[in-house]
Image: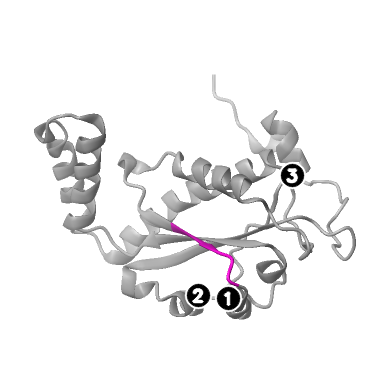
Amino acid sequence: MLIDTLNWRYATKKMDPAKAVPEEKVARILAAAQLAPTSSGLQPFEILVITNADLRAKLRGAAYDQAQVTDGSHLIIFAAWDNYTDARIDAVVDHTVAERGIPREMVTPYYDNLKAQFLPRPAEVNFDHAARQAYIAFGIALAQAAEEEVDATPMEGFDPAKVDEILGLREKGLRSVTLMPLGYRANEGDWLLGMKKVRKPLSELVTRID
């Protein structure tokens, strides 16, 4: 059950560099992210999967020398659109029409209304919105990693500008949002291994309004 796997997972601090995550498990983690819900189905982000050792070494420097970036076998990066544009939204419409086999006029009014809302906004507002959609997929990928018994460390502790520069993301209209190294926990060297998971009790976290 998902609850069991979520209790099993933790933010792994030390990964075993000798253990690589099988590609079929990585594929299912990415498929889960692909299936994540997003606002208006826009999926305004891209996912980078980095296994190149030299590139991950550079990215480790941009992630404040966190060892999981290089000790894990895969580094997953979620990068959000830097802004919404006519072309980007039109591409979503084209894809929807093609996949569903429906007349274009069936969906264009909805997306025209979306453009009227999104396009006049400042780019930073739209990036923040896109980043929140990326986080939904990121969370689902973390959950799927737990289902696969793969350790995944969620990381916001990095320099986005440096990561963007190393990967040339700004030229692609993208900005890095979060990192997720994948690997397997080391038996030694992780101070968090075996520690009790600490979360707010539901009585403090949840308010029911009947």
Element class at badge 1: helix
Amino acid type shown at disc 1: Leu
Q: Cα distance, mark 2 to mark 3?
A: 31 Å
For label 3, the residue is 199
Can residue 4 be seen here? yes
Q: Within the magenta stretch, is there residue 207?
A: no
For label 1, the residue is 59
Q: Which residues are magenta?
A: 47-52
Element class at badge 3: loop
Q: Quick check: 39 left or right of 205?
A: left
Q: Badge 2, how many Cα within 10 Å: few under 14, some, many 20+?
A: many
Q: Cα distance, mark 3 to mark 1?
A: 30 Å
Labelled disc at residue 170: none
Instruction: Give the residue drawn at x 44%, y 80%.
Output: 165
Going from N to C along the chain, the mark reached first, 2 or 1, is: 1
For this rendering, which residue is in front, 1 or 202? 1
Place residue 93 in its image quadrant.
top left
Place residue 15 in its image quadrant.
bottom right
Instruction: Give the residue drawn at x 37%, y 66%.
Output: 174
Look at the image and tell me in which quarter the N terminus lies.
Answer: top right
Instruction: Give the residue drawn at x 21%, y 37%.
Output: 98
